[in-house]
Amino acid sequence: MLLILQFLRRHLHQLQLLMFHLLLQMFHHHLLLHNNLNQIECHLHLIDQLQFEVYHLLLN
């Protein structure tokens, strides 16, 4: 029973990270559609950093 709970907890965490990753991508595309270049550069940099972090968390 404990093993099942640990398994679920671990995969729930991965699913949450994956959802966060997808939300970041959606936000990224949203920014690209609304061309305010100064804001976009700042946000894209932040999004890239976050996606990098999330990707590494997903791999672990």
Image (cartoon, helix red, strand yellow):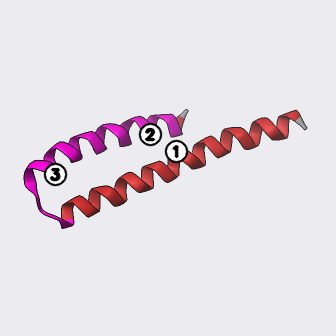
Is residue 51 part of the magenta span, yes or no?
yes
Nearest to N terminus: mark 1 or mark 2: 1
Of the two numbered discs 1 and 3 in the rendering, the one whose residue sits closer to the viewer: 3
Do tag 1 and tag 2 residues touch (Cβ < 8 Å)? yes
Do tag 1 and tag 3 residues touch (Cβ < 8 Å)? no
Which residue type does callout 1 highlight? Answer: Leu
Determine the residue positioned at 35% across, 60% down: 26
Mark number for residue 17? 1
| Figure check: 57 above or below 31 | above
Q: Secondary structure at mark 2?
A: helix
Q: CA distance from mark 1 to mark 3?
A: 23 Å
Which residue type does callout 3 highlight? Answer: Ile
Determine the residue positioned at 44% across, 40% down: 55
By secondary structure, the bulk of the magenta-drawn segment is best described as helix
Q: Residues within 10 Å of mark 2 (few under 14, many from 20)?
A: some
Residue position for label 2: 54
* Whole-percent x, y for residue 46 in the image: 26, 40
Nearest to N terminus: mark 1 or mark 3: 1
Which residue type does callout 2 highlight? Answer: Val
Magenta-highlighted residues = 33-58
45 horizontally vs 50: left or right: left
* Whole-percent x, y for residue 60 in the image: 55, 32
Q: Secondary structure at mark 3?
A: helix
Question: Hey, which residue is sitting farthest bottom in the picture?
Answer: 33
Q: Secondary structure at mark 1?
A: helix
Residue position for label 3: 40
Is residue 22 part of the magenta span, yes or no?
no
Do tag 3 and tag 2 residues touch (Cβ < 8 Å)? no
* Whole-percent x, y for residue 33 in the image: 20, 67
Q: CA distance from mark 3 to mark 2?
A: 20 Å
Determine the residue positioned at 87% across, 33% down: 2
